[in-house]
Image (tube, rainbow, N blue to C red):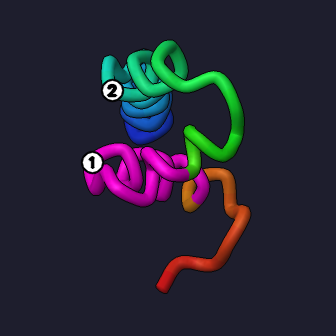
Amino acid sequence: MSNKKNTNKDKNNLDNNKEIKDLLKENDNKEEIAEEISQNKKIADILGNRLANKNFFPPC
């Protein structure tokens, strides 16, 4: 049960991540967001973790 609490806490930290909020404020369209993700490793790691946790692609 405590593992589930940790998972929820981690998810909230990712959802409230300052870099993601700044990215969405600064860029209006999908192309700009995709370009920023490809150039910024920290944001790419955060989004990769989100996708891995939601099982959109298998872990390596």
Depth check, front residue: 15 or 37: 37
Residue 1 percent across, percent down from the top left: 48, 35
- Residue at image point 69% right, 31% down: 29
Disc 1 is placed on an element classified as helix
Residue 17 percent across, percent down from the top left: 36, 22
Is residue 44 depicted above or below 36 in this figure? below
Return the residue at label 2: 19
Graded by Cα atoms within 10 Å as few (under 14), some (14 to 19) or many (20 or more), the crowding at tag 2 reads some
Does the residue at mark 2 contact the one at mark 1 (Cβ under 8 Å)? yes
Asked if residue 5 can be seen in this view, the reply is no
| Residue 48 is a magenta residue | yes
Asked if residue 35 can be seen in this view, the reply is yes
Residue 24 percent across, percent down from the top left: 53, 22
- Residue at image point 70% right, 40% down: 30
Depth check, front residue: 17 or 10: 17
The stretch in magenta equals 35-51
Q: Give the numbered dot on residue 52.
A: none
The type of residue carrying mark 1 is Lys
Is residue 52 depicted above or below 23 in this figure? below
Disc 2 is placed on an element classified as helix
- Residue at image point 27% right, 48% down: 42
- Specify the quadrant of the image occupied by residue 55: bottom right
Q: Would residue 15 be found to the left or right of residue 56 on screen?
A: left
Depth check, front residue: 46 or 52: 46
Q: Would residue 17 be found to the left or right of residue 49 on screen?
A: left
Q: Give the numbered dot on residue 42.
A: 1
Graded by Cα atoms within 10 Å as few (under 14), some (14 to 19) or many (20 or more), the crowding at tag 1 reads few
The type of residue carrying mark 2 is Glu
Q: Earlier in the sequence, mark 2 or mark 1?
A: 2
Q: CA gap, disc 2 to disc 1?
A: 8 Å
Is residue 13 depicted above or below 52 in this figure? above
Q: Main secondary structure of the magenta part?
A: helix
